[in-house]
Amino acid sequence: MITLRELATTLAALMFWKDEIAQGGNQSARPYLKGVGMRGIKPLNADEIEQLAAKLRSLPLSE
């Protein structure tokens, strides 16, 4: 399970990604995806990030 702190950090990171990285398109995301070993993956767009955030909010949390 994910903790509330982990969820908050992840959601904040997604918000940053949506506001700062997704606006720049795939080129802006490449160094970050490469850094996590996912070089060839197409990043999520702003709408998809919102959908992911909603999924994360529905996960069960641990203390």
Image (spheres, rainbow, N blue to C red):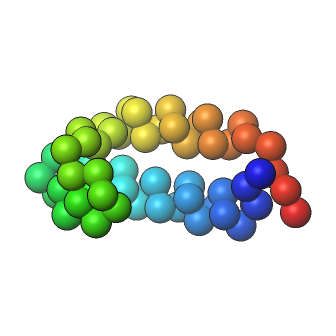
Left or right placement of residue 60 versus residue 25 in this view: right
Task: Work out which quarter of the rendered image holds the C terminus and state it.
Answer: bottom right
Task: Decide: is 26 above or below 2.
Answer: above
Left or right placement of residue 34 versus residue 7 in this view: left
Residue at screen point 30% across, 58% down: 37
The answer to which image quadrant residue 56 occupies is top right
User: Can residue 23 be seen from the camera position used here?
Assistant: no
Left or right placement of residue 49 versus residue 26 in this view: right
- Is 14 in front, or is 34? 34
Residue at screen point 77% across, 51% down: 1
Residue at screen point 19% across, 44% down: 40
**Residue at the outermost front position:** 37
Task: Decide: is 6 above or below 61.
Answer: below
**Residue at the outermost left position:** 27
- Is 62 in front, or is 35? 35
Task: Decide: is 48 above or below 1.
Answer: above
Residue at screen point 50% across, 32% down: 51
